[in-house]
Amino acid sequence: MVCTAGRRLSLAGWLGLPLLFVGMVAGLNGALFLVSGAPVELSSAHFGAAAALAVATSGEVRWRAPWQRHWVRWPWSATLLVGGIFLHGTLIPAVPATAAGVLAAAVFTVGLQRAQRRERQYQEDEDQFAVGA
């Protein structure tokens, strides 16, 4: 799972995770097509996988209010699916697709590092509390 053990995803992190996935997939395809110069074609399958990722990780979100679990989770997943249908077949030049993928991978990596740093700090604080008790 993307979140560290016992910690929850922020709402913003959860909303961005599927978009980062689509960006990284487009970037990987763009990097493969750089040599040939062929454009990257967006696929509804990528957005379907992003929607599945949103549903699969929705149980790990720190919802601010109970109503958000249903009124944000399902519409966001549906928006990803419908967006994928409308964007299916859209061509993106290889260079911008690769740049988007590099940016998405960088944002994802920074987010993971921050979460791991917070988890280490949490563990250190917990260890200090246990020793001081």
Image (tube, helix red, strand yellow):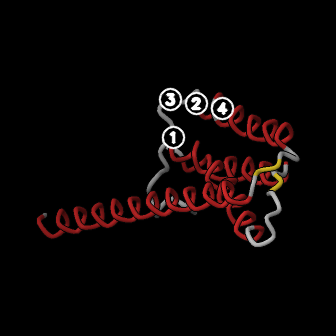
Label 3: few (<14), some or many (≥20) within 10 Å? few
Q: Classify mark 3: helix, strand or loop.
A: loop
Q: Classify mark 1: helix, strand or loop.
A: helix
Residue type of the residue flagged with mark 2: Gln
Label 4: few (<14), some or many (≥20) within 10 Å? few
Q: Classify mark 4: helix, strand or loop.
A: helix
Residue 131 is left or right of residue 124, and the answer is left
- Asked whether the beta carbons under mark 2 and mark 3 sit within 8 Å of each other, the answer is yes
Q: Nearer the viewer, mark 1 or mark 4?
A: 1
Q: CA distance from mark 1 to mark 2?
A: 10 Å
- Residue 19, given in percent of the width and then of the height, sits at 64, 48
Identify the residue under disc 2: 68
Q: CA distance from mark 3 to mark 4?
A: 10 Å
Identify the residue under disc 3: 65
The outermost residue toward the left is 132
Identify the residue under disc 1: 11
- Asked whether the beta carbons under mark 1 and mark 2 sit within 8 Å of each other, the answer is yes
Q: CA distance from mark 1 to mark 3?
A: 11 Å
Q: CA distance from mark 4 to mark 2?
A: 5 Å
- Residue 124, given in percent of the width and then of the height, sits at 24, 67
Q: Residue at x 50, y 61 (%)?
A: 106
